[in-house]
Amino acid sequence: MTASPARCARWISGFSRIAALLPLALVVPWIAACQNLPNRAFRDEPTWKRHPGFVLGIAYSRDLTADSRRKGEPYEKGQPEIDAGGKRVFVGSSDAGLYALAAETGRTLWRFETLSFVESRPYYEPRQNVVYFGSHDGALYKVNADSGALLWRIATNAEVQRQPIVHQGKVYFTNANDTLIAADDKTGAVAWSQHRAPAMGMEVAGHAGPTLSQGLVYVGFSDGIATAFDAKTGEERWRRVDLAADAEDALGETPAYLDVDTTPIALDLTTGPAIVFGHYLGGITALDAELGTLLWSNPLTSGVSDLLLWEEPSRIVDGKESVGRRLLIVSTGMTGLWALDPETGQEVWRRNLPRGGVSRPAAASGLLLFGASQLGVYAVSPVDGSLVDGIHLDLGVSAAPNALGRHAFIMTNGGDFWALNIDAPSSDFSGLPNYRGPTTW
């Protein structure tokens, strides 16, 4: 019996799914034949194709980060932004560039160079056909989405890592020096700003982004303070909430890290509007959106880095209406991936992490897709957190993905840009598992 490298790779990748269905007399010769192939025989089928679930398929991949411009970072954190109408993806890189790519092929449409890493998720505004994004050079940029031409640049004194918000003629963004800025979205002129002195001592890398709801801008700071500002005037509307003090009460000692560096999420609960904050060591806290008073907290979710509200609407199944569900998905670098009940903060499920942390998930075709910093990219069920599929990478994936329907995009730590197709697993085991072809837009 002979076995080609490609056939061996496909067979090995599907072994866990089909081995029980094959006679032992067929399995053993295939294993022996594949084991006798030299390592170089797999070069025509990269290791990322050898994965078990066959839900994640690679539409294409390309090296995005220019080696000549790489700054020595061991990771990539550029997060894609999707323009569905124009079939474009905007994504930053550690080579100091923001790229505009053709979504279907990955072809570079244009590249805008800044003075440092571009890690923030851009914001595409379709009415003006422009892209807003931040850079580690301390600036927020606005560029034309068709050409990449610079429209304006706002310089600050610290890196801008989080996605900005554009609303009613203003753009709101934060930087790593605990500064919240509101600017005119047409001219870039600063309308108002709020600054807190950064915490003394140790801080976790990164900073919180703003959240806007009901005329207020909510943000957390590195000293553990969470608060709200009037979106028009910048006037502080809350009596400041010291989440670090709350964490100290829960832990019984002063936390080593005070940071509230997770972008908050606005929720509508049965008790009314709420804002959920993540404190790195203090866990998750839900506050009343108007007053800032405590609604619930879960201190067990330590190491929180990102939040996502996952929602499944009610629908008709076999003539019966199913009940809609909501889960607050919590990404951490210490305690795993969590799903909490948004109403109470109680754990619905939790999955431990083998190594490293996980990125903010993206909801994709009924699944949760996320990057694992020391492993790769993985898809789990939002219902119970069970693993559906994964693609292992030696360098891992630190960046958060973005998805639209069955399409997803992500940057790897090796500087590659991946376009993924998300398909349901095949139920036909009469032959070897096959990838379904790339889906069309």
Image (cartoon, grey):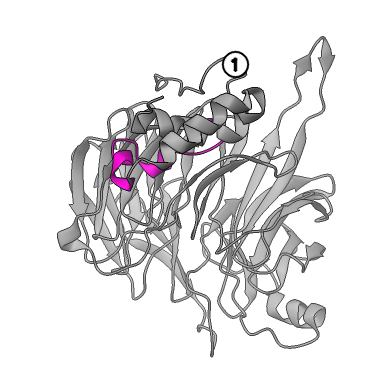
Query: Which residue is located at x 56 percent, y 55 percent?
Result: 211
Task: Mark yes or no: residue 400 visible.
Answer: yes
Query: Which residue is located at x 44 percent, y 72 percent?
Result: 176
Q: Position of residue 291 (x, y in %)?
A: 75, 63
Q: Is residue 359 above or below residue 377?
A: below
User: Which image quarter: residue 293?
Assistant: bottom right
Report if residue 418 lies within the magenta region: no
Residue topped by disc 1: 428
Q: Amino acid at mark 1?
A: Asp
Nearer the observer, 128 or 113: 113
Query: Which residue is located at x 66 percent, y 59 percent?
Result: 336
Report if residue 51 lies within the magenta region: yes
Which residues are drawn in magenta?
39-54
Q: Position of residue 230 (x, y in %)?
A: 58, 61
Q: Is residue 108 left or right of residue 438?
A: left
Placement of the N terminus among the 4 image quadrants: top left
